[in-house]
Amino acid sequence: MKIKPLFLSLAMAGMCSQAMANAVDQNSYANLDDVVTTHLSLDLDVDFDDKQLEGFVEHTLKWNNSKSKTLVLDTRDLDIDKVMYQTQTGSWHKAKFTLANRDDVKGSKLTIEFKSQAKIVRIYYNSRPEASGLQWLTPTQTASKTHPFMYSQSQAIHARSWLPVQDTPAMRVTYSARITTPKDIRAVMSADNKDVLYKDGDYHFEMPQAISPYLIAIGAGNLEFKAMSHQTGIFAEPEILEASVAEFNDTQAMIDKTNAMYGDYAWGRYDLLMLPPSFPFGGMENPRLSFITPTVVAGDKSLVNLIAHELAHSWSGNLVTNATWEDLWLNEGFTSYVENRIMEEVFGRDRAVMEQALDAAGLRAQLKTIDAPDTRLNLKLNGRDPDDAFSSVPYTKGQLFLIYLENKFGRDKFDPFVKTYFDEFAFKSLTTAQFVTYIEANLINRYPGIVSMDKVNEWIFEPGLPTDAPNPTSDAFDKVDTATTAWLQGAKTAAQLPIANWTVHEWLHFLNNLPRDLSIEKMTELDDEFNLTQSTNAERAFAWYMLAVGNGYQPIYPALDAHLSGIGRRKLIVPLYKSLITNGKKDWAQSVYLKARPGYHPLAQGTIDALFE
């Protein structure tokens, strides 16, 4: 079924799909079999002084069990003031509620009892400064240095820390919101942002398509806006706005190419919100408004695959969603595959293959450090917080699985399968088991004798990579390897390395594959010739620092201090802290961390705190 704007107004809002009935989400208390929220109405004040969101949320309810009069919601560190509900006849009453003791992973179960089945329930509450899904930044922690900044990060189970909600990807809601801020602060959300271009401190939002709660997002700060095309634009602090527009002005071309491959973009506009450097991820695919780290503004478009990734989520993840966090690969594996196809269409096959090869090499290295059960695509959390279990496996192993199928069936067969899959499950959540049933009927059995279901099940349910997994290689990397060998053997000097036309991908391949016992003389030669310690490309700097820490190269430490103190993207800081601890620099690393910690997001703080414990 082709997605068209008329269909979107329906958006399957709040429909309790078969996926929901089959999904068992161990990370949520929600009683979805009894009742499901179909729409949320938020009315919240952004209080920078007390570092809290305060107000109320209304849930419009659909009852699946005619005998139930109980609504169970997920919360974490919320203060609940009172609960009111509207009956089916329209009268309002006070509801009895109980907030259970806090579980370290799931938070506190909020149980609301009604005398009769409620049509709408209104919960008055406030978040707390320690909310795991919000970060509050002082003016000095922002680019502008003049205004505070607040933003949310709800994936995986952090929406409950700023919103009492059925916090599971198995359900979907539409939402509307009124957000009030200081008059010189602009608020934005993962919704229609057309009414926020006038800055007045009172903002209204509508999200007409049904999304899972982890995709509800908010940001507020000294934000300006600039359009890049009729469909795309950027919200950012003034200091980074123009550079961001120049870096990401190929976004419309990415949308157009993806439309042609997988069906029309289903969300109206696609804008970007540039966040402060403390954002713990590269990007977050919040619908209509992806949240982006400034560490990918490299000045040469070398890291824009991140934008392709977040855009790809508009089909895989936001449109077709994993029903539980054990099914994350359905989100990230498909997204990584579509991301690479977008990069191929916009920037060419050579660049796409280089990115495949880098990611595959990174996965193969990480597989050596992960417990075997966690190397399966269909992950088993066993009570863990999803944040503690996620790795590159759902991303890159999932992508390699789809590349394997593409290679076996050919794009003439595989592309229509993927497009039909997106159409079939649009605005639905599904489990791995449902996907297996779907692929068997619509690909494996349709084209018999090409790939067996035993092979499909090996990819999904067995640890590690199959022996016949794709191993992408790049001619460009082969040339880098030849030059590297000549340099290591003394046949070339660093000045003779053919770096003039190297992309960041070739640099990363070069640095990541250098020996971890490289001599200080060789390290010094590289640094003197290429000034790697002062690299302004965040990915290249990270690769160099990882090499240097492992090899005991001391001149990096002032720059490494600035790197660790200046950004909060976990990918670019957590491995460095681990390496510093492993290589005898724990005291130095801890002194840097104590200084940098207040500027890190709670998710990064929790990860790094555990390293030093």
Image: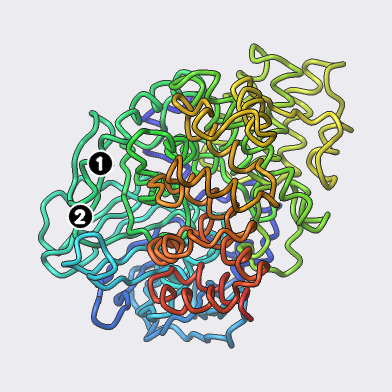
Q: Is residue 336 above or below residue 60?
A: above
Q: Quadrant of residue 511?
A: top right
Give the camera-side residue of 158 and 22: 158
Asked if residue 71 shows in the view, the reply is no
Question: What secondary structure is marked by label 1?
Answer: helix
Q: Residue furthest top?
A: 412
Give the residue at x 11% y 52%: 198
Expressed as whole percent of the image width and height from the top left, the position of residue 203 reads 19, 59
Left or right placement of residue 92 versus residue 421 in this view: left
**Amino acid carrying mark 2 in the image:** Leu
**Amino acid carrying mark 1 in the image:** Ala
Left or right placement of residue 329 versus residue 161 in this view: right
Q: Quadrant of residue 120?
A: bottom left
Q: Is residue 78 above or below residue 435?
A: below
Which label was assigned to residue 243? 1
Which label was assigned to residue 223? 2
